[in-house]
Image (cartoon, grey):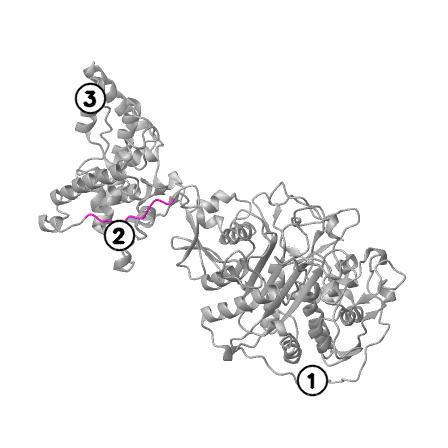
Amino acid sequence: MAVFTLLAGSGLLAGGYYFDSVPTPTDLKLPESTTVYYADGRTPMAKLGAENRTIVPYDQMNDSAKEAIVAAEDRTFWTNKGVDFTGVLRAAWSNLTGGQRQGASTITQQYARVAADLRGVTYSRKLREAVIAWKLDDKYSKDQILGFYLNTVPFGRGAYGIEAAAQTFFGKTVRRDAPPAQQLTRAEAMVLCAMVKQPEADPNDPEGSPGYDPARNARAKQNSIDRWNYIRDGMVKLGYLTPGEAANLAYPDDVKPIDKNAGQSELDGPAGLVVRHVLSELRQTEQFRGKTDEVIRDGGYKIVTTIDKRVQDAAEAAADIRRDTAPEAVRDQPKNWQAALVSVEPGTGRVLGYYGGNSGSGADYAGWYYDEQGQARGFGQHPPGSSFKVYDLAAAVENGISVKQHFDSPDTKEFPESGRTKGSSAGPIRNAEHAPCQPNCALWEATVASLNVTYFELTEKLGIAKVMDMAKRAGVNSMWETVKGNPQPQRVDLRDQPTEEVAKRFSTEVGIGQYGISVQDHANGMATFAAGGKRAESHFVRSVTKGEDKVYTEQLKGTDLGLDNEAIDQLDWTLRRVKAAKLNNGWDSAGKTGTWQAGQSTTQNVHTWMVGWTGALASAVWLGTTDGKPLKTKNGSYEVYGSTGPGPIWRQFMEQATAAMKLDPDKYRFGDPAFPDDTPTQTAPASPAPATSAPSPTARPTPTAEPSSPSPSPSERPTQPPSVSPSVSPLPSLSPSRTKRPQG
């Protein structure tokens, strides 16, 4: 029977040699994990992909693993023909006579098994494995085959290949060009190569057959030590170690403990939302358009993001109001409170810090992104209230209106052309605050006091289109409009058509922040003013590489708003007088608060903002609620405003981030305006030109100063915020269970 089997095997072997194809390493297309890095290109943010694998070319590996794996798995590797015929016959005889089933595989055969996806311990599989191994040995050098093997074999804990194993178990690398202290040592490589025999515990008997991972349990550690000694003896026999070196070699005890969430933990935290934006951004590029996410996740790419780890840490410390690092004013507040923060680098558009929520798989309150199906996800749009007045002010100085020009600014004022009269359902425009300058205030005074009457008149004077065009050119790509008959605000892409046309869908209330924008867009707008009116598109990806090949590089394209130095200086001069924008670290800073009231209430707010910049950093902070209810403190107070809620978050973040970046504030000082057209006694016309195609007056609620035009009353609000939509038709939210919220 044995003779018959051998003869039959010889026939199969001969036939297979000519007809069995040999999959080359390029044919395998093995999944290789993609790593997402912070902006320094060295600090990992997250690992993507079904398998944790990082391929390292053989000639870039140090010798530690090469020697240890040969001593562990195939001591005749350098001399055999890819097949251990003696071992195959011995295994066949043992199997035929009822002995223990044996693999008897060389390193080349083991690689062939992976290459051809051969499973089980059958005779036909062993024959094909031997044929492929024999042909591999003919076609490739021993160095190449060993490199193939070390980059594909599983080591346990989801690590495939020696580099992933070195990082997973020891936090080191096999790259020979790394600093010596960071390279895998011989003793550590021997621990890893011991695990190849059984990478994972037997699921049917995890205690009795735990494998060789020393961190699993005491038996597994003893298994590891015994096999480590076996490998050490083999290295002596092969001449890799002298007896003296072997005697002085100690078993390493610095194996990392098992992390059950390894490979996923990074995606579960705040940085997980950054990864979602990264993938969304890459899907829009020429290199990845139309391809599935698996192409990116399993492609072995190195993605370097724009996120500065120092800035990100400061963002999370300030905006995650559940942490004890958050400002005292927002710490330990009710569970429905939620903050979001985005920071953008002036001049480049690089998003340096992003906090949209505490869960990478949950709601994003700072922005929105496209998922793999092209659906919009996120909850990042909120009515900006008075924080939007920065764009009104920029449009004013662009059009020659000095910040010292005076406006009629009573506590209440009618605007017939915009339908805001005593006889209308919305009523006249009112100020929520009173300023000493009233009723005749300079524009800068009205800005600091956040007078709605002044800014509503300014918007009428400029025209809706000019205000919206300034916001669009500065960085606000989207705005959410209220569509009659549709309870959910609809996203309008401001870049799709001329602003004059888009403006017809909005009313004069745009100037006092009635229509939602995203935190990310708002931060980008602030970055444009911080850069002296030079706008760049906000983005998350700096580069994508694979090995030595550059796959994608950010395109830093800037546009100039056309604001001259005097206009920028007046903007800075005015907004640095906002008390909430003052930093205590010596930096020149400018900013604006904003509040959006709940329903018709003049005392309860549901959205609060703080936005602003220094010459080196711009950021926007939103503080609101997850259920759309008014902000109510733990002490029962409704007195939550831009200056008291997001203001402390913004200031803490800006101070900590600039300190962490170690920048010199003297290099980013603001200029002083000359006020060449200073006309302090001039008063704006009481009845300015009509606004462009304003909606019906009855549709407009009554705004107050910082709490601008109101949202629906609390009783009208469902329990969850809406998702964003990329067009006038709504799209599903991140969570199917979330109800879409109407907009008043």
Label located before the other in sequence (3 or 2): 3
In front here: 626 or 722? Answer: 626
Which residue is label 2 attached to? 184
The answer to which quarter of the image holds residue 417 is bottom right
Distance from disc 2 to disc 1, alpha carbons, whole Å, reads 65 Å
Magenta stretch: give its range. 251-259
Name the residue: 43% across, 41% down.
50
* Badge 2 density bin: few <14, some 14–19, many ≥20, Cα 10 Å: many
Distance from disc 3 to disc 2, alpha carbons, whole Å, reads 38 Å
Please identify the quadrant where the N terminus is shown: top left
Label located before the other in sequence (1 or 3): 3
The amino acid sitting under disc 2 is Leu
Q: Is the residue under label 3 in contact with that under label 1 (CB below 8 Å)?
A: no
* Badge 3 density bin: few <14, some 14–19, many ≥20, Cα 10 Å: some
Q: Relative to 159, does residue 699 appear above or below in the rendering?
A: below
The amino acid sitting under disc 1 is Phe
Q: Is the residue under label 2 in contact with that under label 3 (CB below 8 Å)?
A: no
Direction left: furthest residue: 243
Q: How many marks?
A: 3
* Residue 78 appearing in the image: no
Which residue is label 3 attached to? 94
Q: Does residue 633 appear to the left or right of 223 in the view shown?
A: right
Question: Can residue 692 be found in the magenta stretch?
Answer: no
Name the residue: 11% across, 42% down.
237
Which residue is label 1 attached to? 675
Image spot of residue 74 (x, y percent): 20, 37
Q: Relative to 472, does residue 222 appear above or below in the rendering?
A: above
Label located before the other in sequence (2 or 1): 2
Secondary structure state at the residue bearing disc 1 = loop
Direction front: furthest residue: 635
Direction top: furthest residue: 1
Q: Does residue 619 appear to the left or right of 710 in the view shown?
A: left
